[in-house]
Structure formats: C-alpha cells, structure tokens
Amino acid sequence: MKKALLIVIILCAALGKPQAQTSDSEKLGMALEYFQTGKYHECMLLLEKLDKQYRLNPRFRAYLGVCYYYEWDYEKAYKLLDALISELRNFAPHERSVYYWACAESHFNMKQFAAAIPLYGDMLKVCHENEKPDALYRLGFCHMFQKAWQPAYDCFNGALALYRKYRQEDQKPRIAQIENMMVGIKEHLPKPKSMADNTRAALSPQILTVQKAPIPAMAIPRFSIKMDSIKTKSVVKFSAVRDTLKGKETKDINLDNLFKSRVEVK
C-alpha cells in the first residue's frame, strides 16, 4: 500500500512539471503574437512575469524594452535596452536598428540628448536608407538643444535631402519645418567673410625686419639712407539565432511595422 501511494505521488510530481512548462511556453507564444500585432501592453505583462521566473534571453528582454518604449515608459525602456545593447551585436542589422531607435528615442524623450546621439549614430549604420532621415532629424534636435549649431545644421540638411529623395509626399509638413529651422540656425553660424574683407586682410601693411649689412664705401651716396625707415608691404596668402525558453523557438518579427516614431517634435 505504501509503495503504491509512493508511485502515485512520483507520477503526479512528474506530470505536474511538464504541464507548468507547457503553460509558460504557451504564454511566451502569446507574448510573441501580441508583439507582432502591436499589442505591446499585453505583451509587456506576459514578458515581465516570464522574465521574473526564468530571466529571459537578450532577444526577449529587448522585446520587453521595446514594449516599454511604446507604452511611454521611457525610463524603463532605456535602462533595459542600455544594458542589452552590447549583447545584441550578432543580431540582424535591421533588427538592431529597431532597438537602437527605441533606446535613442527613450533617452531623447527624457531630454538626455548626449546619451541619445551615439544611439542614433549606431542606428544610421544598420537601418534602411529610407529610415535614415528620421535618425538625422532627431540628431539635428539633439545638437540644436545643446547649441551645437553647425552639427545641427548639417544633420537637418542631411535629413532634408533624404526626405525629399525617399518620402517627399508623406513628409511635406516635416520638410517645411526643417527648411524653416535651418533658416533660424543659420543666424547662429559664423558669418562668412566678404571678398572685400579678404582683400583688406591680404593687403594690410606689415613691417618686415631688414637685416643690416655693411655697405661698401664707394656705394655710399652724399646723403644717407636710414635702413630702419624702409617699409615694405607683404601679401598674406590665404586659402578658403535561435532563442529559447526551455526549447521554445521564436517567430519572425515584422520589423517594418515596429520602426516608427512615436513623438513628433514641433
């Protein structure tokens, strides 16, 4: 009787554990479905619970960071993604660009412009060509808010060129905004010297030190010349994988649906 009872207890314990694992695997599958369909709040709730239980791998934790970004919880987003960036180097380039963007945007919205700049720069290296103007646009603001006028002008100018090339129709208001801002930023840039200023600088008299040398007696005229009084003018030259949670395989994520800006700067 005791042996039979012991066998029943062992079987119940053995069956109970796989059922718990299956349940968590199903939760992970649901979280991925939510992520793919843009239901970031539902995805976030599931991933938070699973991360506490299992300490999810870097990809799933990066998904969680993106969820925080889309839920406007920028502080949680950048803290999580900042800690993960170094572990995402082997991921596909465009997938990494989504994480760089979410992290940079989170810093940007927390007014941490110095921290956002290198992340936008990393994104520019791996994103699609038609996504680059978004990063340059944000970089322009980062530099402008730090009163780095020349880099701000250059970034806005680059964004303007790429918006006109790839997204002329759907970004007309932003294109007009950039054009107006560039006019304002020009007021803070050093004024180029005029041609008249350059000419005056080139012809400005400069006294040269003349080395005195002995003069032959026969060459001395009846009147004397003081060598120190000789003045000359000089011309100055100038020149202008597979990821697992107890063996769970991930599904492909539609990255194009993830890559979008949540905040418009006016």
Image: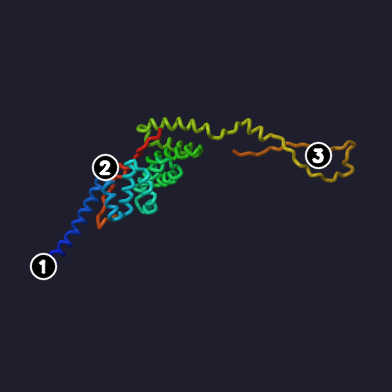
Q: Which tag is nearer the camera, tag 1 or tag 2?
A: 1
Q: Could you tell me which secondary element the residue under label 3 belongs to?
A: helix
Front residue of this view, candidates 196 and 81: 81
Q: Amino acid at mark 3?
A: Asp
Q: Amino acid at mark 2?
A: Lys
Q: Number of marks in the image?
A: 3
Q: Which mark is residue 228?
A: 3
Q: Are marks 1 and 3 in contact (CB under 8 Å)?
A: no
- On the image, the x and y values in percent for residue 3 come to 12, 69
Lower position in the chain sequence, tag 3 or tag 2: 2
The crowd level at tag 1 (other Cα within 10 Å; few <14, some 14-19, many 20+) is few
Instruction: Give the CA separation, mark 1 to mark 2.
Output: 49 Å
Residue named by callout 2: 39
Residue named by callout 1: 4
Quarter the C terminus occupies: top left
Which image quarter: residue 121?
top left
The crowd level at tag 3 (other Cα within 10 Å; few <14, some 14-19, many 20+) is few
Instruction: Give the CA separation, mark 1 to mark 3.
Output: 123 Å
Lower position in the chain sequence, tag 1 or tag 2: 1
Q: Amino acid at mark 1?
A: Ala
Q: From this viewpoint, which residue is outermost toward the left?
A: 1
Q: Are marks 3 and 2 in contact (CB under 8 Å)?
A: no
Q: Left or right: 38 with respect to 78?
A: left
